[in-house]
Image (cartoon, rainbow, N blue to C red):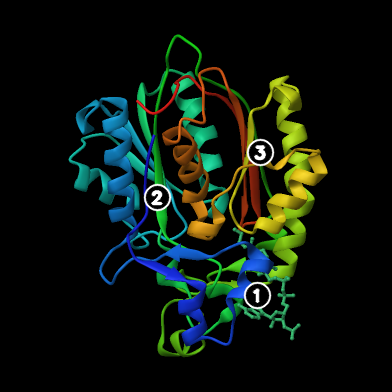
Amino acid sequence: MGSYVPPRRVTNHDLEQILDTSDEWIRTRTGIVERRVVNEGVVTSDLALAAAKAALADAGLGPADLDLIVVATGSPDMLWPSTACVLQGKLGAGCPAFDVSAACSGFVYGMSLVEGLVAAGQYETVLLVGADALSRHLNWNDRSTCVLFGDGAGAVVIRRVDGEGDMLGSVLRADGRDADILKIPAGGNAIPPSTESVEAHLHYITMNGREVFKFAVRTTCAIVEEVLGRANVALDEVTYVLFHQANQRICDAAAEGLGLPKERVPGNIDKYGNTSTASIPLLVDELYRAGSLEAGNIIVTVGFGAGLTWGANVVRWSKGGHG
Ligand code: UT7
């Protein structure tokens, strides 16, 4: 595993200087205290590269060992080529590469996809990266969205092994009828870039926060129960349930719905905000580096986001503390 966040911290107090908002509002409504934001010129593939290098170093592998690169992102460097191809070039790997687009569920979707490809014997060693620089797609005058997001990347090298590590179950879901409640409207061919689209702020994230909140609370508990049923694992056997870090209140409501104590639902939204596809691998890597994951631990990861998409994976961890 590896992860990366850009060094520039933007605190709630910094945002108080440019917006009609307050540290108190942001902290109590979301749990966020600060987030990381890329500097001008830094793009998603740069974040992905740093996380990928850290994951490869952790795995004791080099770019030439990779058979496939998959990048989950909702903020690609450009429409095409894919961010995975740009990353492949920056890494100097020679393997096929493509992106997965499932917004904040991207990493959970990617894990499920890659596990299937590896289990089927199509690829031996796969690099999966969740990377987003959503700060580049925010309207920094819109307090209802810009306070929520941050930038980062997390990566994992997935390999078929004999031993403890395993994916025990996976459930993916989508409901495109609600595509409008969270989106970046322009930039694709529905609304190509134009002076009008820029003036109307259509290249920025737009969101009906309340509806997304209700959707997240509604779906997260149910999908944990469903994926555990599919994996034939009891909730008591699970060490951690790791929710996409979108809002601490969503995580708290889901934990309460499942009857889980706080220690089994760790989070880091206070430090990073919502980093979209990076949030789950950032959190897993943080636990891993802190020595909080032991061989044989079972973790459930839960993603939800634009699409609408949501999903969950059950993973049995194979390694002890970092290294
Ligand atoms: O990865 C998935 C992506 N998105 C999410 O998961 C977001 C899910 N939704 C949420 O997290 C919450 O809905 C928000 C944090 C976005 C908003 O919290 P809320 O409790 O649903 O607030 P609200 O939208 O109902 O707004 C309440 C008030 C409004 O003022 P009035 O109309 O009551 O006077 C807003 O204008 O809070 C105001 N408000 C703010 N005030 C200070 C909205 N944003 C801010 C802000 N600072 N940044």
Q: Which residue is mark 3?
A: 263
Say which element carries label 2: strand
Amino acid on which the number 1 mark rests in the picture: Trp
Q: Which residue is mark 1?
A: 25
Q: Quarter of the image for the N terminus: give it.
A: top left
In the rendered image, residue 54, in percent from the top left (x then y), is placed at: 30, 39
In front: mark 1 or mark 2?
A: 1
Contact? badges 3 and 1 (CB < 8 Å): no
In the rendered image, residue 104, in percent from the top left (x then y), is placed at: 55, 53
Which of marks 2 and 1 precedes in the sequence?
Answer: 1
- For the residue carrying disc 3, how many other residues have a C-alpha within 10 Å: few (<14), some (14-19), or many (20+)? few
Q: Which residue is mark 2?
A: 153
Say which element carries label 3: helix
Residue 167 sits above or below residue 145 on the image: above
Q: Which residue is depicted at the point 49% across and 39% down?
A: 110
Amino acid on which the number 2 mark rests in the picture: Ala
> Quarter of the picture for ligand 1?
bottom right
